[in-house]
């Protein structure tokens, strides 16, 4: 099973790129680079995901679920999409923001198109989320836990929200937060100069695109989800395997954005950025 996950991960990436209207040539090249190159600070390294799967870490399996989820959504298989969105959170609770965004996105879509069948399929698939507390109750000695009981363990929770409140008034907390944010930017590669410049640009570019340029709902959904995966990184462990997938999503979002910018500014197709 693990080898199937590893094998299909780049294949799914290829088909997602095709669904996002990239050419087959570009999709092949991009996927080949993903397999061959090792740029872990932006998550662009298939070998790191393969190694994570072989050591049974959940991040690679969560990435697989996300790719199936997005591909199924693009193909309008809403029930399958919702099921894999649930599995994504079941495997890796850190990605709960994706689940929430997708739920509200589908509710918003229903408000506009009134396609009750699509909404019901989505709700039915996402309702499997209720299995998580039941699973935790059965396998956690009768403890009723919504997602995970490790959320407040100091080894996982590096910065709590109250510490951010005292950022400007407590010097030690300020240093602690700065150190944590540097780890976030670099994915722990503190001696590598490139993440200090590249990663903030990737993050800011997606944020600006969402706020000022994005009009297409699918691009908006993927970009918003990619940003949302970084929310837990501001509080929890944000280096190594915990950071690869969020940064890969952010990098992929930037590729989508660059395609929009190219079409808009170089091909002068002003309807493209509004309608694609």
Image: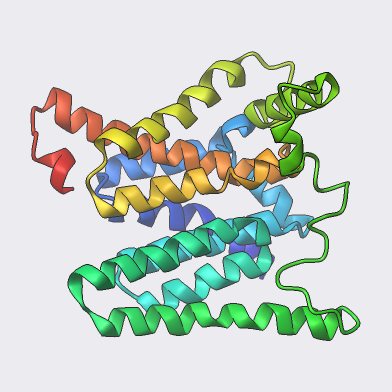
Task: Please determine whether, in this image, residue 244 is positioned above or below residue 138.
Answer: above
Q: Is residue 56 above or below residue 233?
A: below
Q: Residue at x 71, y 21 (%)?
A: 168
Colour scheme used in the picture? rainbow
Rendered image quadrant of residue 206: top left
Quick one: 193 or 120, which is closer to the camera?
120
- The residue at the point 21 percent across, 77 percent down is 114
Res 265 → quadrant: top left
Number of marks present in the image shown: 0
Left or right, 210 with reference to 148: left
Whether residue 7 is visible, yes or no, is no
| Residue at 18 percent of width and 48 percent of height | 276
Q: Position of residue 175 (x, y in %)?
A: 79, 21
Q: Quadrant of the N terminus?
A: bottom right
Q: Relative to residue 61, is residue 151 drawn left or right?
A: right
Residue 263: x and y in percent read: 17, 32
Q: Position of residue 16 (x, y in %)?
A: 37, 55
The location of residue 131, given as percent across then percent down, is: 65, 83
Does the rendering let one see residue 253? yes
Residue at 25%, 44% in the rendered image: 23
Task: Return the residue found at the far right.
Answer: 141
Question: Would residue 50 appear left or right of 173 to someone viewing this image?
Answer: left
Query: Which one is in front, 231 or 31?
Result: 231
Task: Indicate the quadrant where residue 192 lies.
Answer: top right
In the depicted view, which residue is nearer to us: 56 or 245? 245
């Amino acid at each position: 099973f693990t080898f199937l996950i590893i094998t299909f991960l780049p294949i799914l990436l290829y088909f997602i790129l095709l669904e996002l209207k990239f050419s087959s040539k570009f999709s092949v090249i991009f996927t080949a680079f993903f397999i061959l190159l090792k740029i872990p600070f932006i998550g662009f390294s298939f070998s790191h995901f393969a190694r994570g799967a072989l050591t049974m870490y959940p991040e690679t399996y969560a990435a697989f679920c996300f790719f199936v989820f997005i591909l199924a959504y693009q193909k309008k298989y809403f029930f399958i999409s919702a099921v894999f969105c649930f599995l994504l959170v079941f495997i890796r609770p850190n990605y709960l923001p994706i689940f929430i965004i997708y739920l509200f996105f589908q509710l918003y879509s229903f408000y506009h198109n009134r396609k009750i069948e699509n909404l019901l399929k989505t709700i039915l698939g996402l309702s499997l989320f209720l299995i998580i507390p039941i699973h935790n109750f059965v396998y956690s000695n009768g403890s009723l836990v919504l997602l995970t009981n490790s959320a407040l363990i100091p080894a996982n929770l590096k910065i709590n929200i109250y510490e951010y409140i005292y950022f400007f008034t407590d010097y030690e907390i300020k240093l602690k937060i700065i150190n944590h944010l540097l780890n976030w930017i670099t994915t722990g590669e503190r001696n590598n100069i490139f993440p200090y410049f590249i990663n903030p640009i990737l993050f800011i570019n997606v944020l600006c695109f969402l706020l000022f340029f994005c009009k297409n709902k699918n691009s908006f959904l993927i970009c918003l989800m990619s940003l949302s995966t970084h929310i837990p990184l501001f509080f929890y462990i944000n280096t190594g395997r915990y950071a690869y997938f969020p940064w890969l999503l952010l990098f992929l979002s930037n590729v989508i954005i660059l395609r929009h910018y190219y079409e808009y500014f170089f091909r002068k197709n002003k309807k493209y950025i509004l309608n694609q």
